[in-house]
Amino acid sequence: MSLLSVQGLRIAFGSQEVVHGVDFHIEAGEKLALVGESGSGKTVTALSLLGLAQGAQCNGQALFESEGLSLDLLHASPEALRGVRGQDIAMIFQEPMTALNPVFTVGEQIAEVLQLKTGLSARQAAQAAMGLLADTGIQEPERRARAYPHQLSGGQRQRAMIAMALACRPKLLLADEPTTALDVTVRKQILDLLGDLQKKQGMAVLLITHDLNLVRQFADRVAVMENGHVVEQGDVATVFAAPAHPYTQRLLASKPVRNVAPAQPQATTALHTKALRVTYPVPRPGIRGWFSSAAFVAVEAATLDLAAGQTLGVVGESGSGKSTLALAALGLLHSQGDIDVFGQGWGQGAANDLAIRKRMQVVFQDPFSSLSPRLTVEEIVGEGLRVHQPHLSAAQRQSRVVAALAEVGLSDTQFPGLLQRYPHQFSGGQRQRIAIARALIVEPDILALDEPTSALDVTMAQQILELLQALQRKRGLSYLLITHDVAVVQAMAHAVVVMKDGQVVESGPVEMVLGHPQHPYTQMLLAASE
């Protein structure tokens, strides 16, 4: 018998069925990847196995068999499911910052699982929690156990989630997008960690992901979902080498494609920084912290040039200073050194700063958190016009909003009542298009793009990159592209800057830096992205 055998799984919310008769199985110690675009039904399928899909009506069978336990997860009582969760089947959620409780330390949250499931005392559970953190490769586990989730980096939070999930040595681990939004080196570390722990503990893993490269490196078998159906499944090597279904073929073909105008050597400089330095105050240890604070240097002596109509990629791991550099260039952080936007600097007066702000807009990493949930699409996109062109009438503003949305591929024909809809009524890719329209409506010359595709699946990311390339060719826009994805830089950038620990370690034309990297750090980034 398989460890888990799912047959005829159907999931509905009210009268809307979202998963239609799905079948798959997982053997003990096996790694199965469930792959598909956002909305394909893969996450709700995993959640339904543990009774975590709120408001869902589930039918079919999900038989879990392990060491004398035989349980149909879809029809088990709440008490039986509580006994299985964490003990026999554990889950790593997609976003650890929202899955971890912000008011408890990481150590307390791991210890709670051990106390509830294994009966350890508080002291024993706390000691075991530190051991689990050490097993996941976290440095200084005793200190990190006393930290709250917001005090850890993205990679550390993900490791803490893994430690919590593996606390009771489950037989099956459900990993929902465990590396989304992590940079390439941390992603590889998490992947290697999961693989090592899986072999050491002999557990099975159901990996839910849209990252096909992750599947290729990690999984034994793959099941491909489209619109609530499993359209293809088999061993990874066979499916990837000869995909039979058109949807699988389309997923595998969805890679960033370079389609940008060649760099113009005589182009004017749109953005220039020289010896840029950004610091944050941090408390001093001990009694000295009562009287003075120290300074953490986030960016040190950064010099870069962005030419008009071209793209400058800024690459580095989390914590390298690349987002801080972008915020300083946007005039949103106090900094030292020179920043010139078409020859004008920040801090020359409110009117001057407002004029620069119109010429330099930003598209943030996560459109769901950067778009106000209380404003309609019309209010969100038209907000910049109220600031920069207050003389426009309501009708003129609305006309400009409609035109900006059409330019990014959104229309009332596709989405009836588009202007009066709210962000939650759109997919991730559609929300990113709205965010781009909001930036474009004031007709800027420079867009700062902070990880514009990291939260999107492969097909949506490809669509957004194609849109950005088309807009650059049409409008002559300059892009300051902040990313950890080397493939995105290769597709979009004319020049690239590599940052590590707040410093620029290598820069130059993209063909030179990525084709013939000189710095060991750049070489490591490229190796981790393969």
Image (spheres, rainbow, N blue to C red):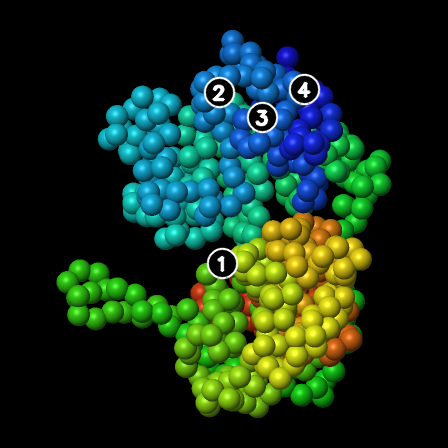
Q: Which residue corresponds to mark 4?
A: 60
* Mark with earlier residue (1, 2): 2
Task: Give the left or right position of residue 462, taking residue 138 as reference.
Answer: right
* Mark with earlier residue (1, 3): 3
Q: Quadrant of residue 122?
A: top left
- Tell me, yes or no, whether the two marked residues, 1 and 2, touch with CB atoms within 8 Å: no
Q: Amino acid at mark 4?
A: Gly
Q: Which residue corresponds to mark 2?
A: 78
Q: Quadrant of residue 258?
A: bottom right
Q: Amino acid at mark 2?
A: Pro
Residue 163 at x, y percent in the picture: 42, 36
* Mark with earlier residue (2, 4): 4
How much space separates mark 3 and mark 2, taking CA atoms?
12 Å
Q: Residue at left 62%, top 36%?
A: 43
How much space separates mark 2 and mark 4, taking CA atoms?
17 Å
* Picture layout, residue 243 above or below residue 392: above
Q: Which residue corresponds to mark 3?
A: 49
As helix, strand or loop, the secondary structure at mark 1 comes to loop
